[in-house]
Amino acid sequence: MKQHPLSAAFPAMPVDQFEALKDSISNIGVQDPITVYEGMVLDGWHRYTAANEVGAECPTVDLGDVDPQDFVIAKNKARRHISQSQIAAAVVAVYQWHPAHRANKVAPGATLSKTNAELADLAGTSVRTIRQAKTVEAKAAPEVKAAVKAGTMSVKKAAETVNPPKAANDSHEAYDPREDQLKEATHAFSVLAEENDELRARLAVGVMDGTEEEKRAAAEIIADLRAQVKTLEAELKAMRVSRDGFQAENRELMKQLGMNAKELKRLRAA
């Protein structure tokens, strides 16, 4: 069997732990059955691989009527060797997955898309870390994603390979930290807008033939997303006004400095 994509969202077990697992299975066999979903290993990939390598039998159980995304998160998030960046990246990857044969629908038994706050709560990280993980998942180079998964790069550093932070420079124009705040807020708005559009499409297909209760729940989710978008739009507008005001003040100061420099030069020449 192959490893299920949801399972593959998490990093591999360290080599020393895998070797210890093989020794254990050689001695006492596989004690906990692996879980199979869609004909692939959803939980227990390392047990399955180790059992094959040592020639041991590996008992299996089907997932059944359980949310596969929530299941794989619950099974993997407590692994001690996983960093906050790794779990954030894995949670984002897990909840962006959908069955290949049901491209516009959620998996059988699965919940609808989760908000950034819900993903952060699941991962035990901040909303900002989840946003960074989404940037990496959507835009980062494959080698950058691999580094995050392996734990050799944080999602913050990985996200900066896509959107480098603006730093103060040696030009005459002053650095305004509000530019970074505006950039981050703009990205957050973009992510939320994409979530909104994707969720609407999935809801339209997924609950078209659903019960009235499911349709009401879908409408409430969309209304909540719209409210979040409006709030971010207002915040972005306020930040743009603040930034524009600062830039206008900066231009006026630079103009005055230029005039003063010319006057000083004239006085020295006299």
Image (spheres, rainbow, N blue to C red):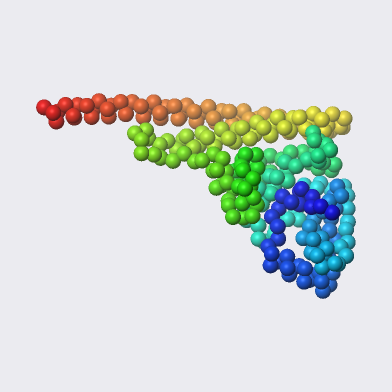
Residue 228 visible in the snapshot = no
Residue in view at x 81 percent, y 39 percent: 100
Front residue (pair 41, 182): 41
Residue extending farthest to the bottom is: 27
Position of 250 compared to 160: left or right?
A: left
Q: Is residue 151 above or below residue 217?
A: below
Q: Is residue 91 above or below residue 180?
A: below
Residue 190 visible in the snapshot = yes
Residue 260 x, y percent position in the rendering: 23, 28
Total marks in image:
0
Position of 48 compared to 134: left or right?
A: right
Q: Quadrant of residue 223?
A: top right
Q: Is residue 257 above or below residue 84?
A: above
Residue 178 x, y percent position in the rendering: 46, 35
Position of 61 compared to 218: left or right?
A: right
Residue 197 x, y percent position in the rendering: 70, 30
Residue in view at x 39 percent, y 39 percent: 169
Residue in view at x 82 percent, y 30 percent: 205
Residue 252 x, y percent position in the rendering: 33, 26
Residue in view at x 62 percent, y 39 percent: 139
Image quadrant containing the C terminus: top left
Q: Is residue 66 above or below residue 205?
A: below
Residue extending farthest to the left is: 270
Q: Quadrant of residue 75?
A: bottom right
Image quadrant containing the N terminus: bottom right
